[in-house]
Amino acid sequence: MKIIECVPNFSEGRDTALIKEITDAMESVSGITLLDVDPGADTNRTVVTIVGSPESVIEAAFLGIKKALELIDMRNHSGAHARMGATDVCPFVPISETSMDDCVEYSKQLAKRVGDELNIPVFLYEFSAPTDDRINLANIRRGEFEGMADKLQIPQWKPDYGPAKPHATAGVTAIGARNFLIAYNLNLNTKDKKIATDIALDIREQGRNKRDKYGKFIRDENGVPIKVPGILKSCKAVGWYIEEYGLAQVSMNLTNFNETPPHIAFEETRNQARKRGVRVSGSELVGLIPLESIIAAGKYYLTNQKRSTGIPVQDIIHIAVKSMGLDDLAPFDPNEKIIEYRIGKRFNTLVSMALHDFSDELSSDSPAPGGGSVAALAGALGASLSSMVANLTFGKKKWEPLFKQMSQLAEKSQQLKDELIQLIDA
């Protein structure tokens, strides 16, 4: 089944009734699932996540943009996050049986409709961008809502769709296709925004402007400041102060979590904070995270602790959450924050039954569950025992030379267990 994700960012984070009107409009489309609504009072911005079939998601995104146009007046908007429109940005992300090229085409379909029917200027960005200077959203958004009227008069910044002037109240929108983006904020034990900004400049891929010995920017022959590249690839970052929490944050967008996963971003930010006499007290995810990313984090910290990585998934997730302080500001519920769990891949009908109920169902005259489900269950229990033996061996000093091998065996056993559990319902 073809599934795509769409993550529109709306420039309203305080009026919950208004936000609900937007999400209600989106949910009126059959074939989509509203996965997450993440408002921020200080940023005055809400990140909405939906998934579904391409046709349904495109329609829901359009209705959300249309409703935002009706309800949000950018002339009265302010917040900590840079913004240029009522629907500031609306990306498509391939999830299942779809490609990035497919999502580029979907983004163009939506952008044309928004420009033609709603008279909102639209820029295509990331993989949809027609030119290199439109790949990075920050380049498009520079000048923000207040500066868009002048910016759109520059030939270089003619919108890809819609009129060459901002909508009076809805501003400008960016629509595109991108990889799964992890929006990740790291909390500092300080209120000083300058420290957060200084850290952000060092770690983000774009880096900071190079300065001479007098502190002045060094420019190239065209007068453009020369950059000193940052430490983390595929990382965009800013520093800000969040009144709601009473602390400064380094706010990141990790645009390719395979290149820079959250746990590496966390550790590097911790290193940079320590150099400046502050510490990272925790972190928060804005929106959702792929299961593989949080599993990678848990295994990273387990390995550092010289512990086996062949343990149940929920235990690996727990280690990741506690190691990165993902529950520092609010409880972290894996069923709400991990995209695969939100889509509903985690629990199946038979698997979620109590053992007593499963046995009763098995003993009835129903043809399912039957021998296949029982065989899968028996195999899962056997794999669980294999993992138990490996983990009991792991950690005993006399078997220390075999720790790596035992961890690998336990991990393989866990993988087999999980695969067999899924087959109980097959």
Image (cartoon, rainbow, N blue to C red):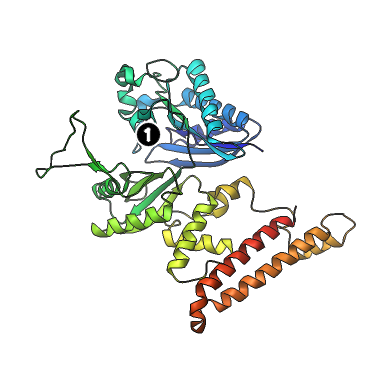
307 to the left or right of 342: left
Q: Position of residue 272 (x, y in %)?
A: 28, 56
Q: Nearer the viewer, residue 226 or 117?
A: 226
Residue at left offset 12%, top offset 42%: 212
Going by the numbered disc 1, the residue's amino acid type is Asn
Tell me if residue 311 can be seen: no
Q: How many marks?
A: 1
Residue at left offset 55%, top offset 28%: 106
Q: Position of residue 163 (x, y in %)?
A: 41, 15
Which quadrant of the view contains residue 276?
A: bottom left
If the image is split into quadrants, where does the N terminus sit? top right
Residue that lies at the very extreme toward the left in this rendered image: 214
177 to the left or right of 222: right
Q: Position of residue 19 (x, y in %)?
A: 50, 34
Near mark 1 (Cα within 10 A), the count class, few <14, some 14-19 or many ≥20, is: some
Q: Nearer the viewer, residue 345 or 336?
A: 345
Q: Position of residue 426 (x, y in %)?
A: 75, 52
